[in-house]
Amino acid sequence: MAQESISQMMTGLRAFFGAGKTKDIDFRIAQLKKLKEGIRKYEPEIMASLYDDLRKPPFESYASEIGILYTEIDHVIRHLRSWAHPRRVATPILHFLSQSRIYHEPYGVVLIISPWNYPFLLAMTPLIGAMAAGNCVLIKPSEFSPSTSQTIANMIGELFESVYVTAFQGDADATRKLLDEKFDYIFFTGSTPVGRSIMTEAARHLTPVTLELGGKSPCIVHEDAGLKYGIKRIAWGKFFNAGQTCIAPDYVLIHRKIKDDFVERMIGTIFSFYGEDPMKSPDYARIVNERHLNRLVNLMKNGRILYGGKYLSKDLYLSPTIIDQVSPDEPLMQEEIFGPLLPIIEYSDIEEAIAFVNQRPRPLALYCFSENREIQDRVLRETSSGGGCINDTISHIGSQELPFGGIGESGMGAYHGKASFDTFSHPRGILFRSNLVDMPLRYPPYRDRVSLLQFIFKFIR
Ligand code: NAD
């Protein structure tokens, strides 16, 4: 799209926002209902597009990109009136006879930039929050999931006036042009390096940002871990969408005593999930494109492959793979894997595992498998991460009550449920002053009132 038409698009969005329609809660609720119905109507196209882009198994598509949106929309509709209601808060005694309220104001025109790995979910979830908070929205889906991006554009085009919510398709260059415009909020999901450049661009206009980034999410498996369920939960979290999940366990830190048992069970679990040849399984997705497949194949050159390691470029297939004897200095342990390669690293003492995690950037998720409450508490107390699970993987993303987001290099800000509403709203604090009395003390000339002021501040705390 030419620069001029980007400006026209922005003018339309600004004018619609300025007209104030989105401030009406009934309007927002009606639009969210419309979105839900639209997704329902488009279900077959969405599933087909996800299959086209990633050969996503329909079960995974429905569970992780569609069903979860219905619960998010229902949750938001149920609570929106109470979240949006101005909140009365206490007023300091100094301002007696006044009232204080926090208003939740929409930012205005919001830009949502989304990635290819959950291309529908990660465009729609922030959209729900942005609409709930009363914003106008421009969505920029990923060019690497073209089929789903087209479906998003078709659906959004059918459901909403383009001056309210619109989809803009384009690559990195086109996105950079978009960023020349002044948005009122930018919500970005993608890689850490691109996140950094989005923040730099946003800084030119002093536009606030949420950055949902990636990184290496560790999975600590302690000697007392309940592997009966644990092993399946780790394999599921790792190989779902062929490992292309921002919060997939990136690597396993395994207690030395149970390593052999872990590997044997993991191989058995992969077999039970996908059969002898995962390439023939309808339940195993593909790598998004050849560039990423080649990147992953190169990563496999590090360490020793214990299981898997098979690939077929023309099918974009890479098998579930377990790797040990990896060196922390090799690319496999330096960059986010984002594919079905599972390095396992031994430790002897929980301190060692914690130190390993803490020597690296703070991850988006952290998982700990242990039956021992003290070990669980210690790992949580002595490490930091965006979120995570104890005795499970990736499931925390499915709760509307848990804010989802990163910390440090894995991102900033959070969303889902109320956290989304808060992210896309500006909390506007307003003091209502009574005209019954006035305090002359505050006005000049101040003369020698400092000691009186000191006396007053001693008592008002
Ligand atoms: P990416 O950063 O390459 O691209 C994300 C979006 O940014 C795309 O829409 C793309 O067109 C745009 N873009 C790319 N380069 C750009 C540039 N220079 N300037 C402006 N825009 C640009 O990420 P990706 O490859 O699509 O997704 C994979 C990454 O996303 C992984 O790192 C993964 O961990 C992360 N991710 C994070 C979350 C989360 O919720 N935190 C969820 C999914 C994926």
Image (cartoon, rainbow, N blue to C red):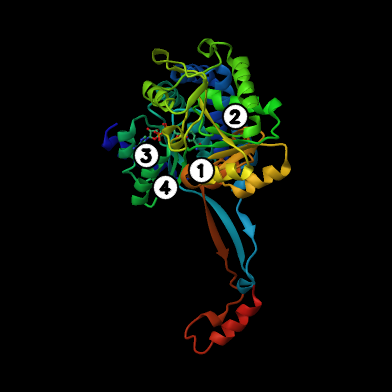
Q: Closer to us: mark 4 or mark 1?
A: 4
User: Dot 4 corresponds to which residue?
Assistant: 184
Which three-letter amino acid code belongs to the residue tagged 3?
A: Gly
Task: Tell me the distance, in whole angstroms, between the alpha carbons under discs 1 and 2.
Answer: 22 Å
Badge 2: how crowded within 10 Å, few (<14), some, or many (20+)? some
Q: Which mark is residue 12?
A: 3
Please state which amino acid type lies under the numbered disc 2: Ile
The local crowd at label 4, few if under 14, some if 14 to 19, many if 20 or more residues have their Cα within 10 Å, is many
Question: Which of the two residues, 141 or 194, is positioned nearer the viewer here?
Answer: 194
Q: Secondary structure at mark 2?
A: helix
| C-alpha span from label 4 to label 3 | 14 Å
Left or right: where does residue 285 sit relative to residue 372? left
User: Which amino acid lies under the numbered mark 1 shown in the image of this protein?
Assistant: Gly
Q: Which mark is residue 17?
A: none
Whether residue 440 sits left or right of residue 146 in the image: it is right
Whether the residues at callouts 3 and 1 have beta carbons within 8 Å, the answer is: no
**Earlier sequence position, callout 2 versus callout 4:** 2
Q: Which is nearer the N-term, disc 3 or disc 1?
A: 3
Residue bearing the label numbered 1: 134
